[in-house]
Image: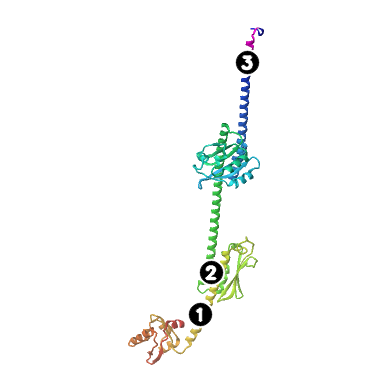
Amino acid sequence: MKDQDKTREQLLQELAELRLRLAELEAAETGRKRVEQSLEQRSRELTALNASVTAMMESALDLDETLQLIADGVLEALGCNTAFILLLDEEEGILKAKAVSTSGKIIERINAIVGFPLTQLEVPARADLNEAMSNILDGRLTIWHDLYELADPVLSKPVCSALQKLVGSRTFISIPLLAKGRVVGSIFATTREEISEIGKETMKTFASQAAIAIENARLYEQAQQEITERKQAEESLRKRTHDLDERVKELSCLYGISSLAEKSGILLEDILQESADLLPSAWQYPEVTCARITVEGQEYTMEDFRETKWKQVADIIVHGERAGTVEVCYFEERPPGDEGPFLKEKRALINAVVEQLGRIIERKRAEEALRELKKFHEGIVQSMTEGIIVEDAEGCLTFINPATAALLGYSPAELLGQHWTVIVPPDQQPIVQAVDERRVRGEVDRYELTHPQGWDAGSCPDQRRPPVRGRSLR
């Protein structure tokens, strides 16, 4: 049928069909554009998400830095205008805010409305707190349009209203952070737009990657803490070992000086000289240490001694009077200690050394005085014309002066070590025994001895008792 042959009705019908077809094409084009826009949005989100995830994974593994990257990533990758991250403290049972990110400089205004820095926010991690917390602990993503429903009872309704007005958001979202199926925290975010299903999936993907980054950062932080603690333990052990070695050196020095004093027949001068040679080994740096002991003007030093400004000095006190000094010097500079380059323990050591030397000097001088006194007394006893006999507790003769030997007609060698009964006739021994027993009780008595040639040796008072007098005459 030719066009001119078509009726009016046919033309109108075809026109309607064309218009319907055109509308369908326009609708399809609109749908296509929407799909393209959605794909472009999804592409932008994925690009931003990839960038954020890459930044998180490539961060220095510092936990605070990682959390801030996550908060910033919520704004960049998910198109939100406010976000903050809360981590779960399982021991305390609290979600603690750790990082905040906002579009625009409104964080100070948010803090002013809340009444404290948002990073100090703490929320009890209890399922009965509210629906939002129950969903978080169950690992469910949740969306609200009223901030008070999300924040009650942590924030009051007026505060929530003021915050909602400030950020200009109508959608609030909580996204749980899950690591190996376990809730480790949550992301809270706000947006001015409704969140599509694709957006929700993007948020879940982002939260999953963020949880991995958080766990990695936590593990790294834990490893660093363990390394630090191990290093501290090693350093503590090293210091304790060093301190123990120092104490051993100090005790060895004091023992060495004590051992010198115990040597039989050693002169005081030799003790002082050997002590000066011994001292450096007890100080912290023996390779640069020298010592000098001075007693009444006489010096006892190491061969390489030289006085320096790095020294410790202590006085030797004998019978309450200053008798000399002990000096310990470093001939090279060393790190600062408690007293110049010296540790406080070395001050205690040098004080112990001078105290020990003071006692040794006192003892040696007392021994010398005793020897002189004994020598003097022996000279007197040996020259006396009266006979003197000393016996021990068992009655054996321990001393006989020449006058006694002459009176009794024996030589001293014949009598020393013998029992007194060798010089007393058997018939007189009971008498002497009785007298001897009375003297043991502290009574003074007299008895007579008979000379081997028959003449009377005379009567003489007992000089064997008390023991103290006997000992002083030996």
Q: Residues within 10 Å of mark 1 (few under 14, many from 20)?
A: few
Question: To which quarter of the image does residue 32 belong?
Answer: top right
Q: Name the residue under label 2.
A: 257
Relative horizontal placement of residue 310, taking residue 414 as reference (left or right): right
Q: Can residue 58 be seen in this view?
A: no
Q: Can residue 353 be seen in this view?
A: yes
The answer to whether 241 is drawn above or below residue 176 in the figure is below
Where does the image place residue 231, in percent across and percent down from the top left?
55, 52
Q: Which of marks 2 and 3 is nearer the N terminus?
A: 3
Nearer to us of marks 2 and 3 is: 3
Whole-number angstrom distance, CA of label 3 to CA of label 1? 146 Å
Secondary structure, mark 1, is: helix
Residue at the spot 55% in from the left edge and 71% down from the top edge: 355
Question: To which quarter of the image does residue 6 belong?
Answer: top right
Check residue 16 in the rendering and tell me which mark sits there, or answer none: 3
Whole-number angstrom distance, CA of label 1 to CA of label 2? 23 Å
Q: Any magenta on residue 17?
A: yes
Check residue 164 in the rendering and tell me which mark sits there, or answer none: none
Secondary structure, mark 3, is: helix
The answer to whether 429 is drawn above or below residue 181 in the figure is below
Q: Any magenta on residue 64?
A: no
Q: Earlier in the sequence, mark 1 or mark 2?
A: 2
For the record, the magenta segment spans 5-21
Where does the image place residue 434, in percent across and percent down from the top left?
35, 86
Q: Mark 1 points at which residue?
A: 370
Residue type indicated by callout 1: Leu
Residue at the spot 33% in from the left edge and 86% down from the top edge: 430
Which residue is at the front of the view, 211 or 23? 23
Residue type indicated by callout 2: Ile
Q: Which of marks 3 and 1 is nearer the N terminus?
A: 3
